[in-house]
Amino acid sequence: MSLAVVILAAGLGTRMKSSTPKVLHKICERPIIQYVVDSIKPLKPGKIIVVVGPNSEGIKNALAGYSVVFAIQKNPLGTGNAFKVAAKELKRFKGTILVLSGDTPLISASTLQRLLDLHRQGGEDISINSFIGEGDHCYGRIIRKGGEVEAIIEDRDADEEQKKIKEVNGGIYAIKSHILNLLKEIKINKGKGEYYLVDIVGIAVNKSYRVAAHIIGGESELTGVNTRKDLYKVSRYLRDRVVERWLQDGVSFIDSASVFIHPEVKIGMDTVIYPNVYLEGETIIGDNCTIYPNTRIVSSEICNSVVIKDSTVIESSIIKDRAVIGPFAHIRAGSIIGSSSKIGNFVEIKKSVIGDGTKASHLSYLGDAEIGENVNIGAGSITCNYDGQEKHKTIIEEGAFIGSGTQLVAPVRVERGAYIGAGSTITEDVPSLSLAISRAEQRNVKNWAAKRRPKDKKGN
């Protein structure tokens, strides 16, 4: 079956109250329009046409790298006019045209394929994806007569009886290419001053074309984003869908309603996730991990049996097996934390490699560093990696001991097994198995405090 896809994405989205086109608003840091185009890929269409408005650079940039053709709707004259603009790119096309909105990010490829299968099996000229609407909504109603589809009427044009109809329009259509000839018969809606694509249904029925509506999917999948409330609702739907998937695959959640996990994230079995955890980007979590509350992990790899303690941030880094991170740790981009290592409270790691079994337990900054295995970093120690113009590397070899309050002024190397005395400022390389101390000699001034203490009224 020859297949072309038309995505209607030219809407101004005025109800979003935003200068950003609605299809560029983000869910899990990805524009809505990308979700829609990704849902189509498994169908392998011969052509994807995205209808956009005249100021569409943002949408074009969001779809850079996607194999799509853009059609420009110069004036906002409704979905009927938008489809007519797309039809200019389909003059010689013979087959089925799948039409959907660019603001339905949760639509699945399986639902689209099911509609196409029913369209083909029933020999239908127009197939409509419908669903059962619950509660207050503004979806168009499917009007039937004797069980057969007669028309679709928009909510704003429906009377009180029609508004009681439960079957509503999902906004997705499979249309045979010869139906494009009916586009010229769509009349402008005088109430709104637009051409409604849904009017093509009534026109086709009157001309005895075969039209059918199929109840496939539900509101959580077919919700369009027209308002900030819709955006919030869709984000929640996606969150629940992702959490449900991982619950089925052996992941435990202490409070699933408070976590947010991007769709691209992967999580291993027997991992436990506490409340208020955010897993973003293409993060990979291994087996048997524990992620405690208020943690954010972005585009990172967390290997097996890792413990991430409370209020930790990890960005674009690798945490190897059995490491313990946090609480209140910050692992910045480009870092690798070795197996069985420990990065403790208020420790910041930036673009550094930490060897297996190494410990930095308290209040340290380690930037642009290469640290070997089984190194001890004392509390309050830092690498001074920036000279005001350039960044420099600190190298600490295996088995070294860095005393508390040490400042390592890069570029500098501490060789294997060396010791640094607490409170030292290290500006030169330290040889293997040596002790380096750079603190000033202690001097006690007797009675100094007594001389400074003010006397009381009695002269004491």
Image (tube, grey):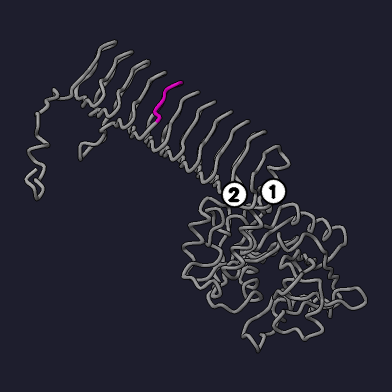
The residue wearing badge 2 is 259
Q: What amino acid is at disc 1? A: Pro
Q: Which mark is residue 210?
A: none
Quarter-of-image position of residue 415: top left
The residue wearing badge 1 is 42
Which residue is at the front of the view, 102 or 258?
Answer: 258
The residues bearing labels 2 and 1 have C-alpha atoms spaced at a distance of 29 Å
Residue 66 horizontal/vertical position (percent): 56, 52
State left or right for residue 230 relative to residue 160.
left
Compared with 342, 222 (above or below) is: below
SS class, disc 2: loop
Query: Which residue is at the far right?
Result: 146
Q: What amino acid is at disc 2? A: Val
SS class, disc 1: helix
Query: Which residue is at the far top?
Result: 433
User: Which residue is at 19% across, 25% downward?
Assistant: 427
Q: Residues within 10 Å of mark 2 (few under 14, many from 20)?
A: many
Q: Does the magenta segment cover residue 411? A: no
Quarter holding the N terminus is: bottom right
Range of residues picked out in magenta: 354-361
Query: Which residue is at the far front?
Result: 458
- Residue 364 visible (yes or no): yes
Query: Which residue is at the far bottom?
Result: 190
